[in-house]
Image (tube, grey):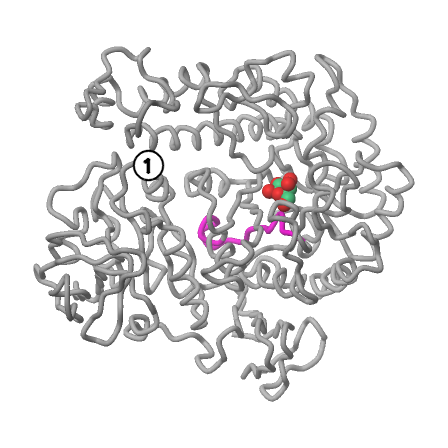
Amino acid sequence: MPTVDGLAFGGDYNPEQWEREVWEEDIALMREAGVNVATVNVFSWASINPGPGKWEFGQLDDIMDLLADGGVRADLATSTASPPPWFSHAHPETLPVAPEGHRLYYGARAEYCPHAPAYQEAVVEMASKLAERYAGHPALAMWHVGNEYYRSCFCDLAATEFRTWLRERYGDLDGLNRAWGTTFWSQTFTDWEQVLPPRACAETPNPGHVLDFRRFGSDARLRLFDSEAAAIAEHSPDKPITTNLMVTGNFAGNDYFRWGEDLNGENRLIAVDHYLIPGDEIAYEPQVAYASALSRGLAHGQPWLLMEQSANSSAWRGGGFPKRPGEQLRHSLGYVAHGSEGAMYFQWRASRYGTERWHAAMVPHGGRETKTFQEAVQLGQWLKNLAEVKGSTVEPQAAILLDYESVWAFDTPGQLSSSMAPFPELRRWHAALWKRGVVCDIAHPAEDLSRYPVVFAPSLQMLDDDANLRRYVEGGGTLVVGPFSGVMDRNEHVHPGLPGALRDLLGVRVVEHVPLREDESVALDDGTTGRLWAETAVSEGAEVIATYTEYPHGPAVFHRRIGSGRVWYLTTRPEDLNPFLDRLDLEPEFPDLPTGVETVRRTHDDGRSYLFALNHTDQEARIPAEGRDLLTDTEWTPTKPLRPNTCAVIRQHR
Ligand code: GAL
């Protein structure tokens, strides 16, 4: 965890964009707001390394000293996310190449090819120099490597690294040909030199090829992160090292569960960026809990840190989309409720120029009088009051399984139905559980799931076998499987005998998939309806719980007991998830709270427990609990009203 006292509070701070007089004011405002961490040097390559072999650390020294003197700790970034023009100009091969084969120019950010040796060497040199210089600096709290890794490149250097990666995975060309099923359309490779990134081709490309390139890209970016992290650790072995993962509910650039293996290591930290999707048709409010559920899942239940969120409108989301009064406070507490060790923002002070000149900030262009800044001051006070929460954890009642590879598989060409995307479905289940007050994690299907009483697998197309899920069910767990799950192996080859890898476990044989039109629904004899998808299926040992009343006829919902565990299979996507959820034994701690009044509990090993209550509705609510509300430092009683759009954090002992 960042070496700060209490919870982390602050944001990206770019003083290099400002005159020195403003720096003094920044520190004064940070102190007023209670900011204790600032993320610096994220996009400063051009200042600290303005030319080949030129290093100018004077400005960064001043910034670090300024922070130290002001009592603010630094989340020191390595600035490698945005090579400056001189670098791209000197090393044109480091500029990324698009799938169509043209090289992209510089002029924005993240303009690098992750596979270019010149870039790879430069970032290690940069990280090493920074670590050597600042390892002992009193402001240093933690290291922030790169920024939101996502860049892909389709150049010849990428081709070379891709081939090496493929050789490691498949051994020889026969293995690769088998995995990609190259006998289809006569795509067989006879020499490694013929193997390229999936560049734009005349028709739909080979799905295995596309899928492997995404795996490879994620691994290559992780290797980049690792190379910097290793260089830092040599000089600065005792400070946490992290990078900011994107947990917005539609981002699948990297396999973060693989990254998590790395970021959960000693002196590492899971840190995340979360930007709300406006006008989101699935659910707006539960997004904070969703992003947190994923972060907690990546951190295996251990504390994690919200590194970036927006204080108000985000310039990237079409400008509009302001946060209403109280919203950023409520959302920030939402992340903390769900296990974040603080609430950080992009960014501290609004930029006067550049693409993000209208992006929200803790200090907007209007300065300290703004509601946004005043709320930042309020939040700073609250987080100070909540310092003792640090280190406590959340105990989820359920998990929803996410496999980034299954998400990628859905993006490959040749889908049976374009409406069966995994992410929206995962978020729909999450939102339904959230509305019922059930706290859940987002977890990976291959991990040890035994700590979750119920596990949902709404959309898991790719599974080699059922081993891990079977272990979970045999150990007494309840598994709920959505349609079209387990149908393909890791190479995207359809398993013989549908539904595939899960057939034996489910005790169900699927005869035929019945994708539905978008406006179509199917009726079940329990009064519910399904949409997007149906199947004709027969029992091979499972009990039939509900049946289609018309086409496709036959069983729709199956249930099976295995030892003390149970497994459910839904052959359609229920229009309303509640009737199904009613069948499960999933009671929240406070079952009588109205929808939108959220409670989450964080607990220390010694029994100190904090009940976070967040009222997302426009009605007063009552939380039937007693203890001390740490936000207002007053006693909480069951009769006390929790006003609309406000929060309480009630200290109790369990
Ligand atoms: C993040 C990024 C920041 C800033 C922010 C604006 O994704 O890390 O640098 O661009 O978005 O919303």
* Residue 639 appears left or right of 591: right
Question: Crowding near pointer 1: few (<14 within 10 Å), some, many (20+)?
Answer: some
Q: Would residue 613 be seen by someone viewing this image from the given angle?
A: no
The one nearer the camera, 4 or 517, is 517
Name the residue rendered at 53%, 19% in the picture: 103
Under circle 1, the secondary element is loop
Number of callouts? 1
Amino acid residing under circle 1: Thr
Name the residue rendered at 51%, 56% in the picture: 292
Name the residue rendered at 76%, 25% in the picture: 47
Residue 472 percent across, percent down from the top left: 26, 56
Magenta-colored stretch includes residue 297: yes
The one nearer the camera, 103 or 449, is 103
Which quadrant of the view contains residue 455? Answer: bottom left
The one nearer the camera, 340 or 406, is 406
Relative height, residue 652 to residue 499 (above, below) = below
Magenta-colored stretch includes residue 147: no
Which quadrant of the view contains residue 323? Answer: bottom right
Which quadrant of the view contains residue 457? Answer: bottom left
Relative height, residue 434 to residue 96 (above, below) = below
**Magenta segment range?**
296-310
Q: Residue furthest right?
A: 21
Asked whether mark 1 and ligand 1 are closer than 8 Å, the reply comes as no
Quickly name the residue at label 1.
412
Q: Residue furthest bottom?
A: 639
Q: Would residue 349 be seen by someone viewing this image from the given angle?
A: yes
Name the residue rendered at 81%, 50% in the picture: 365
Residue 102 percent across, percent down from the top left: 50, 19
Residue 142 percent across, percent down from the top left: 65, 40
Residue 420 percent across, percent down from the top left: 31, 51
